[in-house]
Amino acid sequence: MEIETTKIAGVLLIKPRVFADRRGFFMETYRHERYAEAGIEAPFVQDNLSRSVQGTLRGMHFQVNYPQGKLINVIQGEVFDVAVDLRTDSPTFGQWVGAHLSEENKHQLYVPPGMAHGYCVLSESADFLYKCTEVYHPEDEEILKWNDPDVAIDWPIDNPILSDKDQHNAKPLSAFQGRASSTR
């Protein structure tokens, strides 16, 4: 497994070893010891799977009092996955990193607690599977505007399909300064 660090501390691009032959492929998507060596030590307590159609943008979600770390895989299709640092004590607060994750490249992204997270679907559809270090608490969820000019994410789509929640309940980065997620 190959680990690439990003400009945001704790956000890791993971390239698992893939064993492919004429029958298909095999890969480990998670082994505690190996991921702990890379700094991903928190236990995972919930797995989520979503399917979305091309042009869908989900995000930018985070939990304030119960921040989630996420280990992300795309098992079908392709997405552009984004993490925004909302740790108020971080030198990269308000900055973002993005990665293309797909069934072809089989890369993973680890997004630590304290980040807003979202993705857009680039293929006809995508199956998005992720492990979480904290369970989902809907009453604790906040949403950062996907197109906030202060964050300036360079999304590879222009007019995404958004949920009502993401369209109407999202707030700008300035609303979270001084009170955003912690790493616990």
Image (cartoon, grey):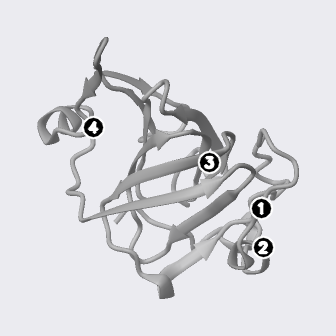
Distance between the Cα atoms at labels 4 and 1? 29 Å
Residue 135 image position (x, y, % from top left):
33, 73
The residue indicated by pointer 1 is 161
**Depth check, front residue: 155 or 125:** 125
Residue at far bottom of view: 139
**Depth check, front residue: 76 or 88:** 76
Q: In what element is the residue under mark 1?
A: loop
Distance between the Cα atoms at labels 3 and 4? 21 Å
Distance between the Cα atoms at labels 1 and 3? 13 Å
The kind of residue tagged 3 is Ser
Task: Say how many tags the image has.
Answer: 4
The kind of residue tagged 2 is Gln
The kind of residue tagged 4 is Thr
- Residue 167 got which mark? 2
Residue 68 image position (x, y, % from top left):
39, 63
Residue at far left of view: 33
Distance between the Cα atoms at labels 2 and 4? 33 Å
Q: In what element is the residue under mark 3?
A: strand
Q: Residue at x 42, y 29 (%)?
A: 106
Res. 116 in view: no
Q: In what element is the residue under mark 2?
A: helix
Callout in the foreground (1, 3): 3
Asked if the residue at tag 4 contacts the one at tag 2, i.e. Cβ–Cβ closer than 8 Å, the answer is: no
The residue indicated by pointer 3 is 125
The residue indicated by pointer 4 is 29
